[in-house]
Amino acid sequence: MAAVALTVGGIVTLLVVRNLSTDFGWVATAPLASTSYIPGAYGMTHVLNASGAVVLVLGLVLAGFMAGIRVGRRGRAEH
C-alpha cells in the first residue's frame, strides 16, 4: 500500500510541477544589471521536480521489492 501511495504521490508531484506557470517576458528597456534572469533556473521547480522523481522511483522500487517478497513466499508454500 505504501508503494502505491509513493508512486501516485511522485506522479502527482511531477504533473503539478510541470503545469506551474513561469513568469517571463520581453521588455523594451535594457537590463539594469549585467546578469540575465532565467525563470525557474534556481527556483523551487527544480527541487520539486527532483523530489517528485525521487518519490516516484522509491515507490516503484518498493513495489518491486514487495512483489519479490510475495513471489518468494508463494514459491516456498508450494514446495
Image (tube, rainbow, N blue to C red):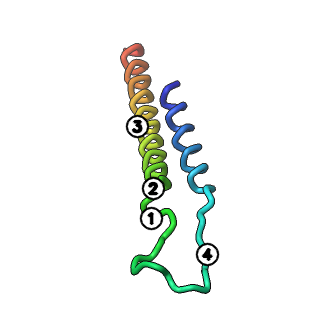
Position of the C terminus by quadrant = top left
Amino acid type of disc 3? Val
Verify CB contact (< 8 Å) between mark 1 and mark 3. no
> Disc number at residue 61?
3
| In this view, the mark in front (3 or 4) | 4
- Residue 59 at x, y = what percent? 46, 36
Residue 12 shown left or right of residue 52 in the figure? right
Verify CB contact (< 8 Å) between mark 2 and mark 4. no
What is the number of callouts on the image? 4
| In this view, the mark in front (2 or 4) | 4
Q: Furthest-front residue in view? A: 32
Amino acid type of disc 2? His
Q: Does label 1 or label 4 sit earlier along the sequence?
A: 4
Structural distance between the alpha carbons of marks 2 and 4: 20 Å
| In this view, the mark in front (1 or 3) | 1
> Disc number at residue 46?
2
Residue pointed to by mark 4: 25
The quarter of the displayed image where residue 23 is located: bottom right
| In this view, the mark in front (1 or 4) | 4
Structural distance between the alpha carbons of marks 3 and 2: 22 Å
The quarter of the displayed image where residue 41 is located: bottom left
Q: Does label 2 or label 1 sit earlier along the sequence?
A: 1
Q: Secondary structure at mark 4?
A: loop
- Residue 58 at x, y = what percent? 41, 38
Q: Does label 2 or label 4 sit earlier along the sequence?
A: 4
Badge 4 crowding class, 10 Å Cα cut-off, few under 14, some 14 to 19, many 20 or more, is few
Residue pointed to by mark 1: 41
Verify CB contact (< 8 Å) between mark 2 and mark 1. yes
